[in-house]
Amino acid sequence: MIKLIKPTLKFKNSFIKAVMEYQKEGYRYIDLNVYELKNDFPSYLKSLANHEKGINLINYQVPQITFWLVKNTEFIGSTRIRLKLNDRYHKQGGNIGYDIRPSERKKGYGNNLLRLALKKAKKTGLKKALLTCQKDNIASQKIIERNGGIKIKESEKDKHYSPEKTKYWINL
Ligand SMILES: CC(C)(COP(=O)(O)OP(=O)(O)OC[C@H]1O[C@@H](n2cnc3c(N)ncnc32)[C@H](O)[C@@H]1OP(=O)(O)O)[C@@H](O)C(=O)NCCC(=O)NCCS
């Protein structure tokens, strides 16, 4: 059975394998150091907890809650929920970001991950969530639309316009 959990030491090995998959793909977690993760996973967990509390934020970051999608002992993917948005996240990133590790894609997990993330976001009191994705990311657009995404019509004159992004609101 799949479930959404807070990051924990229990999934250390599976998470590190997933990081290596992502790094090979060159997309997520490129800044993480596998050697450091292996040696001191609690520090990584602490950095996620700090990010949630708004501690040690850098540049454009805002507080965000990370959840992991897991199945039995395996890490499958992750989602990040941001309750407050700044200009950067209005342009790209929105309230919810998510990804499925490369070896577990095209099995329906992405769709389920967003469904569960929306439930969590609703519980925090968020009324509607902004989702953004690359215009050529067909899988993500399908997932967002299947989960109630309403496409936002934007023009170049709009404050948060970002030409390469398709954006949606999802009412929670
Ligand atoms: C986008 C992503 C989360 C999709 O995860 P996934 O587990 O493969 O998604 P699902 O299996 O739930 O598939 C959802 C739909 O997209 C389709 N799909 C999946 N991968 C696809 C691809 N590469 N090209 C076209 N369609 C694709 C599936 O067939 C499915 O369509 P259906 O509902 O009509 O059957 C995953 O590819 C990923 O992590 N990508 C990198 C990060 C990313 O883009 N995150 C989203 C940011 S907005």
Image (cartoon, grey):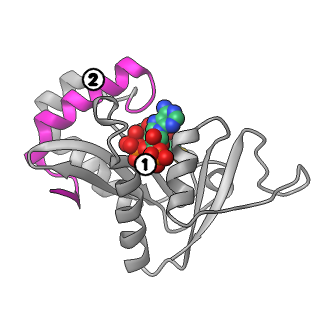
Magenta stretch: give its range. 1-29
Residue 68, percent from left and from top:
27, 52
Q: Nearer the viewer, residue 147 or 54?
A: 147
Residue that numbered label 1 is attached to: 98
Locate the N terminus by quadrant. Answer: bottom left
Please tell me whether residue 156 is drawn above or below residue 172 in the rendered image: above
Residue 22, percent from left and from top:
35, 27
Residue 164 horizontal side relative to residue 71, left or right: right
The structure residue drawn at horizontal position 59% and vertical position 63%, both measured from the top left corner, is: 149
Q: Quadrant of residue 130?
A: bottom right
Crowdedness near tag 1: few (<14), some (14–19) or many (≥20) residues, C-alpha within 10 Å: many
What type is the residue that disc 1 sits on? Tyr
Give me the C-alpha separation between circle 2 and circle 1: 17 Å
**Mark 2 or 1 closer to N-term?**
2
Q: Mark 2 vs ligand 1: CB under 8 Å?
A: no
Crowdedness near tag 2: few (<14), some (14–19) or many (≥20) residues, C-alpha within 10 Å: some
Q: Residue furthest top?
A: 24
Q: Quadrant of residue 27?
A: top left
Residue 46, percent from left and from top:
23, 50
The structure residue drawn at horizontal position 37% and vertical position 32%, both measured from the top left corner, is: 29
For the question of whether residue 142 can be seen, the reply is: yes
Q: Nearer the viewer, residue 54 or 108?
A: 108
What type is the residue that disc 2 sits on? Met
Q: Is residue 37 magenta?
A: no
Residue that numbered label 2 is attached to: 20
Q: Mark 1 vs ligand 1: CB under 8 Å?
A: yes
Res. 131 mark: none
The structure residue drawn at horizontal position 36% and vertical position 18%, both measured from the top left corner, is: 24
Q: Is residue 26 magenta?
A: yes
Assign a secondary structure to mark 1.
strand
Assign a secondary structure to mark 2.
helix
Residue 62 horizontal side relative to residue 99, left or right: right
